[in-house]
Image: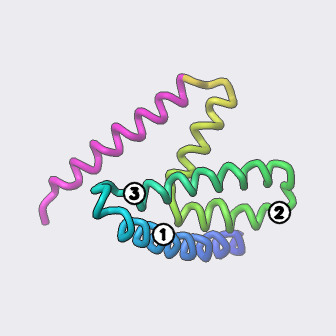
């Protein structure tokens, strides 16, 4: 168990650094013309693509479970939690639970934005 926690932590560290680097570079390059948070959007899309690849790979090769924690939970979790959100939504659809999938998406986005708004109103 401790090995999986350490692998996840190391991966999260790497993923977080990659998120800052990728979003920073893209924002510097495109923000002046787009006026849009392209960096984090790109990070989220890249993370979703990669988690799809890793999910398919590890589904066929479960013997590499430790590597799965390092790459998916660690690196991609540190890179973006949006990738995990997307994978869980996809799995709900694949399990023939479209109502749960739609509720999960709408609930996460709407409640997340509402929570962010409410949190921003707290003054210290």
The residues tagged by marks 1 and 2 sit, at their Cα atoms, a distance apart of: 27 Å
In magenta stretch: residue 111: yes
Quadrant where the C terminus is found in the figure: bottom left
Mark seen at residue 64: 2
Indicate left or right for 87 with 56 as reference.
left
- The residue carrying mark 3 is 38
- Dot 2 alpha-carbon crowd within 10 angstroms: few under 14, some 14 to 19, many 20 or more: few
Left or right of 40 in this view: 113:
left
Q: Which residues are magenta?
A: 99-124
- Quadrant assignment for the N terminus: bottom right
Q: Position of residue 44 (x, y in %)?
A: 50, 54
Q: Is residue 97 a member of the stretch shown in magenta?
A: no
Residue 86 vertical position relative to residue 50 in the rendered view, above or below: above
Q: Quadrant of residue 92?
A: top right
Residue for badge 1: 22
Mark 3 crowdedness (10 Å alpha carbons): few <14, some 14-19, many ≥20:
some
How many numbered circles does the render carry? 3
Camera-nearest residue between 58 and 32: 32
């Amino acid at each position: 168990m401790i090995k999986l926690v350490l692998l996840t932590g190391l991966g999260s560290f790497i993923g977080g650094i990659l998120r800052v680097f990728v979003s920073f570079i893209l924002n510097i390059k495109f923000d002046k013309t787009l006026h849009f948070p392209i960096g984090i959007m790109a990070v989220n899309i890249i993370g979703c693509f990669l988690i799809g690849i890793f999910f398919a790979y590890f589904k066929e090769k479960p013997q590499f479970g430790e590597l799965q924690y390092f790459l998916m939970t660690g690196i991609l979790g540190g890179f973006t939690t949006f990738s995990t959100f997307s994978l869980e939504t996809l799995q709900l659809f694949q399990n023939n639970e479209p109502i749960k999938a739609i509720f999960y998406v709408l609930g996460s986005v709407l409640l997340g934005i509402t929570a962010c708004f409410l949190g921003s109103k707290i003054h210290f």
